[in-house]
Image (cartoon, rainbow, N blue to C red):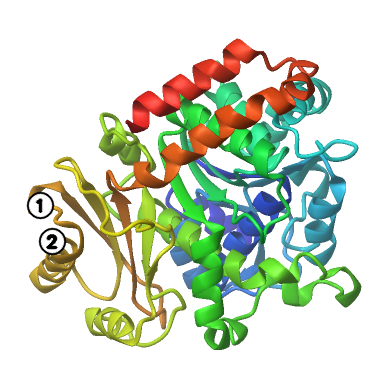
């Protein structure tokens, strides 16, 4: 049955691979895949498709991100396996996910790529070890081809921007993909999480240096650099804790003795996973939008970075525009980036928005007018600079929306980070230069980021 259906199913667009970098990236990326599977109606612990109708429907919408793999576990069922790489220097984070979800990550030896210990919050060490241990010894190109024998359409890359492994790995991975004859045409979407100092385990000076270097790589190599910050994620997670407690998480299924560290980020990771899942839905379901369209939208934008406004933050309610309106009325929405630090947010003539609406039925004039008015009132974004993408819902799936904002106000938060990084460089330069990050390379990153954001 599964083989016959696989042959009959329409071919999905070329695959999209989730490349999860570092401890944070692995946690968020695995949570995002879990979210996508729950939307489909599959059990993440034993993800399968049942019956010909469900297989055709789901594979048509998700075939670019999910593999059909191996023989059925039970009669009439086809196992689902994510097209995902879990990449870290410390093997513990990837191993926890593999052990907790052995049926989901069935190609265990293909999914996880790791080294022999962390990068000590040192961006330069992380980059050097990615080149030597991951690209050189692990042959990451072969790992990618094992998960996707077809040419790769795109990569989704979640990571933390303030550490030493996730950000440096993501940066070097982007450079590797764009410089590869095999992978060079793939679109890259990055989900970089800014740390919250005083809450996250990052070292103040090196974290700013890491962020600047990561921003420079995203400007050069990421086609859709999406930013969130842990301050806003924590605020929203605390505010809606009751609703998030009611939603299951990958953390809940980890052995109790190893939840420490992961549990602190449970609700924040759920919100970040919701953003990634909504983003993926915009091009893996039957829409007129492709992942590469994000590259064209942002090609001439300054700043190139975008931030998500998620409505609702936690899925709830019906499948129509009314439930989205109700979510805003209830306060079940949030911009997951701290824009307004010192009074009113700076606005620009080129500010724009990409509105992803997941609801039942065809796109309606009412939906368009609702979001145009919302964006005009809050951000003064003009009609002609708003892109509207309608995403079809799965059965019993609640309506939701995500607005990707490309606004000048982002610069106001990012530019002070550049100043802090410059001030910190002299204190840490020997650490970095000993691991092949030169002063000239750092200064070039500072100039590129300052110029782009200024």
Q: Quadrant of the N terminus?
A: bottom right
List the residue tagged with mark 2: 376
Q: Residue at x 73, y 27 (%)?
A: 428
Name the N-terminal-most of marks 2 and 1: 2
Q: Which mark is residue 264?
A: none
Q: Is residue 343 above or below residue 207?
A: below
Q: Answer left or right for 396 relative to 274.
A: left
Q: Residue at x 43, y 57 (%)?
A: 337
Q: Quadrant of the C terminus?
A: top left
Q: Is residue 275 above or below residue 316?
A: above
Q: Answer left or right for 97 relative to 237.
A: right
Dots 2, 1 in contact, CB < 8 A: yes
SS state under label 2? helix
Asked whether residue 12 appears in the rendered view, the answer is: no
Q: Residue at x 35, y 28 (%)?
A: 452
Q: Position of residue 300 (x, y in %)?
A: 25, 29
Tell which of 76 and 191 is nearer to you. 191
Residue 349 in which image quadrant: top left
Q: Residues within 10 Å of mark 1 (few under 14, many from 20)?
A: some
List the residue tagged with mark 1: 382
Tell which of 197 and 125 is nearer to you. 197
Q: Answer left or right for 155 relative to 91.
A: left
Residue 209 in which image quadrant: top right
Q: Position of residue 255 (x, y in %)?
A: 87, 73
Q: Position of residue 287 (x, y in %)?
A: 30, 55
Q: Is residue 297 above or below residue 364?
A: above
Q: Residue at x 41, y 79 (%)?
A: 397
SS state under label 1? loop
Residue 411 in which image quadrant: top left
Asked whether residue 297 appears in the rendered view, the answer is: yes
Disc 2 from disc 1: Cα separation: 7 Å
């Amino acid at each position: 049955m599964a083989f016959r259906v696989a042959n009959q199913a329409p071919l999905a667009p070329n695959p999209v691979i989730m490349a999860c970098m570092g401890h944070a990236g692995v946690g968020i990326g695995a949570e995002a895949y879990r979210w996508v599977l729950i939307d489909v109606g599959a059990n993440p612990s034993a993800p399968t498709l049942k019956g010909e109708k469900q297989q055709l429907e789901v594979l048509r919408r998700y075939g670019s991100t999910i593999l059909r793999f191996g023989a059925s576990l039970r009669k009439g069922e086809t196992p689902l396996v994510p097209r995902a790489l879990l990449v870290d220097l410390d093997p513990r984070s990837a191993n926890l996910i593999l052990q907790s979800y052995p049926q989901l990550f069935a190609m265990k030896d293909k999914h996880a790529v790791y080294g022999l210990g962390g990068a000590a919050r040192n961006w330069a060490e992380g980059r050097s070890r990615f080149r030597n241990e991951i690209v050189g010894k692990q042959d990451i190109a072969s790992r990618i081809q094992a998960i996707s024998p077809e040419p790769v359409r795109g990569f989704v890359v979640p990571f933390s921007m303030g550490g030493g492994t996730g950000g440096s790995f993501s940066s070097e991975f982007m450079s590797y993909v764009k410089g590869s004859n095999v992978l060079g045409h793939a679109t890259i979407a990055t989900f970089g999480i800014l740390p919250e100092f005083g809450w996250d385990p990052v070292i103040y000076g090196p974290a700013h240096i890491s962020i600047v270097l990561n921003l420079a790589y995203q400007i050069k190599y990421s086609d859709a650099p999406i930013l969130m910050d842990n301050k806003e994620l924590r605020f929203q997670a605390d505010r809606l804790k009751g609703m998030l407690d009611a939603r299951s998480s990958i953390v809940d299924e980890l052995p109790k003795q190893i939840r420490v560290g992961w549990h602190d980020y449970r609700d924040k990771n759920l919100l970040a996973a919701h953003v990634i899942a909504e983003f993926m839905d915009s091009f893996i379901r039957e829409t007129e939008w492709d992942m590469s369209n994000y590259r064209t939208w942002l090609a001439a934008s300054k700043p190139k970075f975008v931030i998500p406004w998620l409505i609702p933050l936690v899925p709830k309610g019906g499948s129509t525009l009314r439930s989205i309106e109700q979510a805003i009325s209830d306060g079940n929405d949030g911009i997951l980036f701290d824009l307004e630090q010192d009074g009113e947010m700076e606005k620009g003539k080129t500010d724009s928005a990409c509105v992803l609406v997941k609801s039942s039925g065809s796109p309606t004039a009412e939906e368009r007018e609702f979001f145009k008015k919302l964006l005009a009132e809050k951000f003064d974004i003009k009609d002609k600079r708003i892109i509207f993408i309608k995403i079809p819902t799965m059965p019993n799936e609640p309506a939701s929306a995500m607005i990707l904002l490309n606004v000048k106000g982002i610069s106001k938060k990012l530019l002070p980070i550049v100043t802090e990084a410059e001030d910190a460089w002299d204190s840490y330069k020997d650490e970095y230069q000993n691991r092949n990050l030169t002063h000239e390379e750092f200064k070039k990153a500072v100039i590129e980021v300052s110029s782009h954001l200024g």
